[in-house]
Image (cartoon, helix red, strand yellow):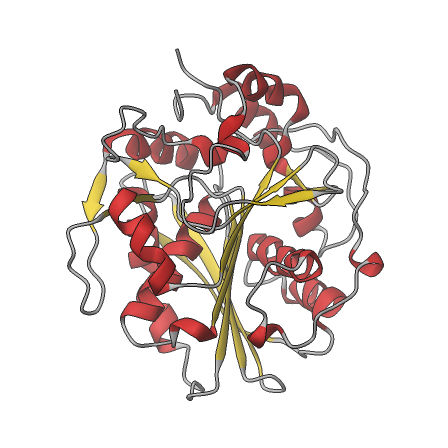
Amino acid sequence: MFRITSYLLFLSAPLLVLAGLLPWNNDLATNTDYDPATARRFFDLAVASQLGPNDDAKRQQCFDKSWSDYNYQTVVVKTAVCDSKNNECQMYIAYSAVKNNYVIAFRGTNGGSQLIVESISSLNTYDAFQAGTYNGGGRVNHYFYEGVRSLWPTIKANLGQTNSETTFFITGHSLGGAMASVTAARLSLEGLAPSNQIRLYTFGQPRTWDYQTATAFRDWVPYTWRIVHNSDPVPHGPPMDTSGAKTGPYHHTQEIWYNEKFDSFTRCSTQSGEDGTCSDSLSDFKFIVDVVNSEHLHYFGVKVNDYGAAGCSSAFTHSLFAAFLVVFFKLFTQ
C-alpha cells in the first residue's frame, strides 16, 4: 500500500512563529548547533529561490527582511533544463561582502510535468556518486544529482570571491532541499569550500542518498539540519528499505522535527538520519491525514509558495498547481 507523499495545500495552522519574535544569532559562521532563529532566517533564503531573474526587488525584500546585517546582493539567477521532458531547475547565488558569505539556494518542484518525472525517477533510479576524491561506491538519487549537474557550471563560475575565510549557506525546500544537499557535498568534496564553513538548512527534503553516502555525509558537511514539519510526507519518500539490509534511499543527519503548530521541535539523532523516535515514528494514517493538513507546503506558519512569491511577506492565495499536487503526488512512498 502506498503512503501519501504530496506537495500539498490549504493553510491549516496560524502564523505562530514570526522572525521578529526570535532572537538572532549574528555569528552564524560559528554556529555548530541547531538554532531555530537561524533556521527561520534560512527559510527566507530558501523561498526566495522561487523568484525569477526579473524579480530582483522581491528577492531583495527577502534578503532585507531577515538578513539586513548581511547586505546580500544577487550574483546570478539561473534556470537549466534538468530532465528528459525539458523541465527546468532553478537556483540563485547571492553574496555578502560585509560577511564574506555566499548563499546558494534551490527552487522546489515547478509544475505538474516536473512533478511526474521527478516522482517516477525517484522510485527506481540511483546513480553512483562521485565528487572530488570520493568514489566510495555510495549512491545518490538520479533526479536530484542531474538537477545539480545541470547548474554546476554556473555555481563554479560564480564563486569568484572565495578565500580561506569565506562561508557558505546552502538551502532549499523540497526538491530544492535535495539539490542543496548534493551541492553542499560537492562543494566540500571538490575543495571549493571547507566542510566546517558550510551551513546546510533544508525544509521538507526528500530522501536524497543511500545508506552509505548518507552516513558519510556527516563528515562531508557536519553542520547540517533537515527541518521536517510534523507529518510532512515528502521526507518519507522515496521509500526506505525496511528489510534491515540498509540499501536504497536513506536520510543524512540531523533531522529537526517540528510539531504541527510549529511552536516546538525535537533535535533528532546526530548519528542516524532515520531516527525511529522522530518523524519515522508516525503511522501511515498520519501521512494520509496530511492530505488535509498539507504540512509540506506550510513551514514556520506560512504557505511556502505564496510567501516566497510575495517577497517574504504574508500571502493567503492558493495556486491551482498546489491543488494538483494534492491530487497527484502519490507514488513516492510506500
Q: Is 329 located above or below residue 189 in the figure?
A: above
Quarter of the figure that contains the N terminus? top left
- What's the residue at 41%, 79% (across, down)? 159
Residue 140 appears anywhere in the view: no
- Seen in the image, is 265 located left or right of residue 97? right
Asked if residue 68 shows in the view, the reply is yes
In the displayed structure image, the side of residue 86 where residue 255 appears, left or right: right
**Image position of 286 (left or right of 140):** right
Image quarter for residue 273?
top left
Q: Nearer the viewer, residue 246 or 190?
A: 246
Q: Position of residue 217 (x, y in %)?
A: 34, 56
Placement of 72 over or under 301, stated as above or below = below
321 sits left or right of 18 in the view: left
Quarter of the image with the C terminus in it: top left
Instruction: Give the tally of numbered discs.
Output: 0
- Figure quadrant of residue 265: top right
Name which residue lies at 53% across and 41% down: 204
- Taking the spot 39% from the left edge, 21% from the top edge, the residue there is 331
User: Between residues 106 and 247, which one lies in front from this camera angle?
Assistant: 247
- Give x and y (percent) for residue 215: 32, 50
Q: Position of residue 132 (x, y in %)?
A: 21, 69
Q: Residue at point 60% right, 83% down?
A: 99
Which residue of the protein is positioned furthest toward the right in this rendering? 21
Vertical placement of 191 versus 302: above or below? below
Query: Furthest-top residue in view?
Result: 1
Pinpoint residue 155: horizontal percent, then vertical percent: 38, 69
